[in-house]
Image (cartoon, rainbow, N blue to C red):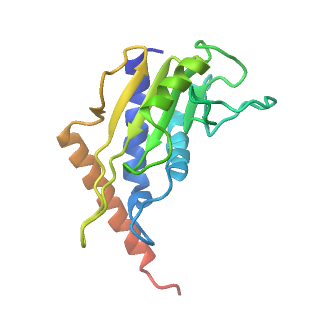
Amino acid sequence: MKRDGVESRVRIALRNLIVDEYSLFVPHHGKRPVSELTASAHLARLLVPQFSRSWDVDCEYNRAGLDEIKRDSAGAGRRPDVIVHRRTGEGSRHNLLILELKITSGRGGGSEESVQDLLTKLGYRHGLFLHLNWQEPKAEQEPLLNPEWRWFGESADSSRQPVYQHGTLAAILAEARLNWAERRRFLDVPNG
C-alpha cells in the first residue's frame, strides 16, 4: 500500500479520535491529558476498521515467542506505540506502518529519530511520527490540538507537516467540542 492510502486511513482514524474521544484531551485532574499509551490504544482501535482484515493493528507490540526486545540504534528498548502489520510475517511485505504518537512537547516517549531507527531496523514500509501539539487550556477555554506529522520510508517528508488544513481542523475541533458538551450533559444528570 502506498503512502497516500495509509495517510488517508490514519487521517480518518485521527479525526475520529479527536471527535469521539475528545474527553481524553480535556484535563480532569491536574493540567495534563491522558497518557500517550492510552491515546495510542484508542487510535489503534480506530485504525482497525480503516484497514482490510489482512492487516493487524497492535499497540506496544512485542512478537510472541521472541525474547529480544526491539531496540533503537542507541540500544534503548523501544516498542512502537502502534503498528500495522501481519503478525505471521516479517519484512516490508508484512510490515506496513510504525507509528509513534506524542501528545505534548514534553520529554519522554518516541521521537522522530526513534521512528526512523525502528523503521530501518524492523523493515517497515512507512514510519509516522504524529505530534498532536496539545496545549493546556486557558481559564474556561477548551484544550487546543494542532496535529502535525512527519512520514518516513517511502515518500518521506523532510519536516513536520500539518495533518489538516486550518478550516478542516477548526471544523473537527468544533464537532469534538459539541460532542463533549453533549456528553457532559449526560454526566450532570442526577441518578434516579
**Residue 167 relative to residue 56: left or right:** left
Q: Residue 178 occupies which quadrant of the picture?
A: bottom left
**Residue 63 relative to residue 126: left or right:** right
- Number of numbered markers: 0
Residue 140 x/y as whole percent: 25, 72
Foreground: 30 or 6? 30
Q: Where 155 falls versus 136 (above or below)?
A: above
Residue 115 x/y as whole percent: 49, 29
Q: Residue furthest front?
A: 74
Q: Residue furthest right?
A: 65
Residue 169 x/y as whole percent: 25, 44
**Residue 160 relative to residue 38: left or right:** left
Residue 139 x/y as whole percent: 24, 72
* Residue occupying the point 45% across, 29% down: 113
Query: Does the rendering let one see residue 132?
Result: yes
Q: Residue 156 occupies which quadrant of the picture?
A: top left
Foreground: 91 or 116? 116
* Residue occupying the point 30% across, 56% down: 135
Q: Residue furthest left?
A: 167
Q: Where 33 falls versus 150 (above or below)?
A: below
Query: Does the rendering let one see residue 50?
Result: no
Q: Residue 136 occupies which quadrant of the picture?
A: bottom left
Q: Where 146 falls versus 187 (above or below)?
A: above
Foreground: 59 or 106? 106
* Residue occupying the point 46% across, 41% down: 101
* Residue occupying the point 40% across, 37% down: 130
